[in-house]
Amino acid sequence: MLSVFRWLLRLLTGLVALGLLCLIGVYYFLERSIPDYTESFSIAGVSAPVEILRNNDNVPHIFGATDPDVYFALGFAHAQDRLWQMTMLRRTAQGRLSEVFGRRTLKVDELLRRYDLYTLSLQSVEAQDDPTRAALEAYAAGVNAWIGEINSGARGRGAPEFFFFSNEIAAWAPADSIAILKLMALQLSGHLEAEVLRARMSMLLSEERLRDILPDDPGQAVTALPDYAQLMPGITPSFAPLRMATNDPLSPFPRLDLAGASNAWAAVPERSAAGGTLLANDPHLGFTAPTIWYLARLELQSGGVIGATIPGVPSILIGRSAAVGWGLTSSYADDQDLIMEKLNPANTEEYETAEGMKPFTTRRSIIQVKDEAPVTITLRWSEAGPVLPGSHYDLASVTPPGHVAALSWTALSGADTTMTAALRVMQARSVDDAIEAGRLFVAPAQNLMLADNSGIALQVIGQLPKRDPAHPTQGRMPALGTHAAARWQGTLPYESNPRVVNPTSGILGNTNNKTVDRPFPDHLSFLWGDTQRIQRWLALMQTREVHTRESFIEAQLDTVSPTARAILPLIGADLWFTGEAAADNTPERLRQRALTLLAEWNGEMNEHLPEPLIYMAWLRALNDRLIRDELGPLADSITHPDPVFIDRVFRNTGGAGVWCDVIQSAAVETCADLARIALDEALITLTATYGPNPESWRWGQAHEATHDHPVMGEVPFLKWFVNIRQSTSGGDHTLMRGRTKGTGPNPYLNVHGAGYRGVYDFADPDSSVFVISTGQSGHPLSRHYDDLGERWRRGDYVPMSLDPELARAAAVGSTMLTPP
């Protein structure tokens, strides 16, 4: 017996030792792909030595003799830190994910192939000016130089993910960078889905009730802050999204409520305490690990520039130079229209127009699928744009028999000069230069917020479609292609794009709110991304005669919800407890405790408080109770409560109070009845999840920021190493926006927000600060994978200097690229 025990002990010891050896071996090979930032390279592609200085936050400061050398080094640095992310962005744009992930991504690839973004990117290379083509070519050479180092040296395949998936890395090309910009345009576009939603709801609701749930905007536009308290934002519509064909983390197709948001504001020197212009910007995108943003500083012939890049793109897309600071917010310009093309019954390869039958432009495309036979699809384009399958965007439900849906979209251009515009904005010497550079911007349409040493401006950049005044649906719903007025008549001149320069108030701001009052067809959009955050911004701006870098940071990090302050008194008007306490352990007592908490709450969506969780759960339950019987299963696609809708209902605006009556019940319910029932329902759900004591609930428990790895983030065991989860404050309608998921077992997860924050003070430019939401590296074993994430969560920033001596003094690593 003792002998058996000894042999079992030896066997167990051997297995443990073998397991440790395997772990050590795996770690060794994975760790080999972490770059050594002190290593130097003799490398073809640079004309003279180039220096890449890395500070303690792994931000590269790049110094070279020529601009192409600097772009080469940026490509090299991007590839060192984010090669897997870059290749995934390229595969996505090309519609080639299924080569790696199999049938899982087939629908994604099919739709991307129909958009044909990569073919359009190849065509667009020739549309760039000579300096931009040179930059693209030098950048691609830098990426390929690092790929060459991976292939020739023991560098762990370039990234840990390549151990689990194919490590065949095609050479980078200029078109790849343009394709990534087009992919970003796709991720920031939501009007297609909004058209489908409005069309579907119009078939279920009367005109009055459609006006309730998808209200028009009768209010004023807000861009510049006038004299204090003169301007109040109007009510704008909030369009609930439909479900997409796939919710895969690898899908680039956003739900409408996650199709882009951002904040930006600026002040002239007269409104700045230090006497220099101020600019703050935080663009909002879906969270990933690593974030889409990568910080870098480039020393170009035109001067230094620092800010946020996207790996794969040779440009500081958001940031500042010594002369100009610039930021971006989603403009929500209506740059997409669905056209229902009528097929020729005698020949389905033709479609009917006002001028007669025309043939589709067609070609075959083969999608390679891992471990399966290839799938061949036929791509069809009408004069409106690509024909999309009915299985995507729920198009089948709004497509008439004998028709197919084609999409007109400004991003579907083979002469897209957005890359040239981005490089020209980056090298602008003044606000006027940057506005002129925006002329070449095609898609996505954005609000460009600008500041130089003396002034500020907001300019809408991007092409805007020119529509016929007789357009049958004004672009708000799909239209028949047989109606000539439904087709675009080109694009509007750049001079007609909204522009505000040095307003008399001295302050500009945008939170994706309405920016211009112009009737159709000169309008910018019927759909706006914000009705709430702009109210809080106005209040904060009006509290001071002059502002500082710190007051702009305070606004960026503000977590007070104007929605909660406005909605709670309405929905709880008849419920606030004033009588005797109910018996313990009863629903009535639980409701009283929750209402007592809410009555003393100031609307701050703080992660350490229970009130935000109660409020959000109540609003979700109430919204579902209001719309479920009218919309049926379609209510499942409305994932976020619309505060404008709830306000209309509880104020009985236009008779909207009828939404409170449950059609399928005999009794006539009041809005107070539904509010009480919804609160009890919400509290039961919260009790089951977080325990019976509301005072101990915490918003941050539910509102975790989900910086998840899109590939390995769902793999057991590995997800604990690659996903970054953080308790966060903020919410759907706060300036420090933390957009909730809206679906699944935890609908309160923070999935969309500011992946980058920057604040620039031109009175003391080197006091400018910035931060990203994860870290610079895409390698989970690197300390730079998440080192900036904790600062981001706390609302901290890192300095942002263009002083070369400061960069060298703070350098913790120096990489030299020298010609062979």
Image: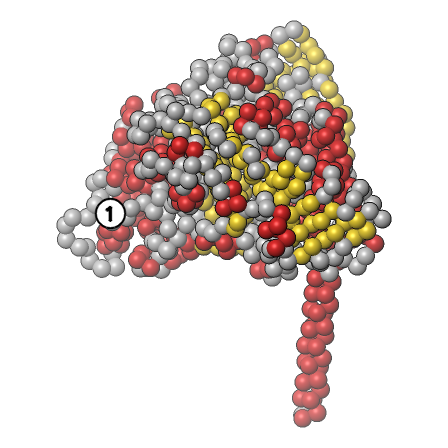
Q: Which residue is mark 1?
A: 599
User: Which residue reaches farthest right?
Assistant: 820
Residue located at (59% from left, 23% from top): 436
Image mark count: 1
- Residue 412: x %, y % from top left: 65, 25
Please give left or right for residue 541 compared with residue 803 in the image.
left
The disc labelled 1 sits on which kind of residue? Ala
Residue located at (36% from left, 60% from top): 691
- Residue 609: x %, y % from top left: 34, 54
In the rendered view, tell whether residue 490 sits above or below residue 124: above
User: Which residue reaches farthest bottom?
Assistant: 2
In the rendered view, tell whether residue 396 sits above or below residue 722: above
Q: Is residue 667 visible?
A: no
In the rendered view, tell whether residue 709 sits above or below residue 329: below
- Quadrant of res 535: top left
- Dot 1 lies on which element? helix
Q: Nearer the viewer, residue 463 or 647?
A: 463
- Residue 166: x %, y % from top left: 76, 50
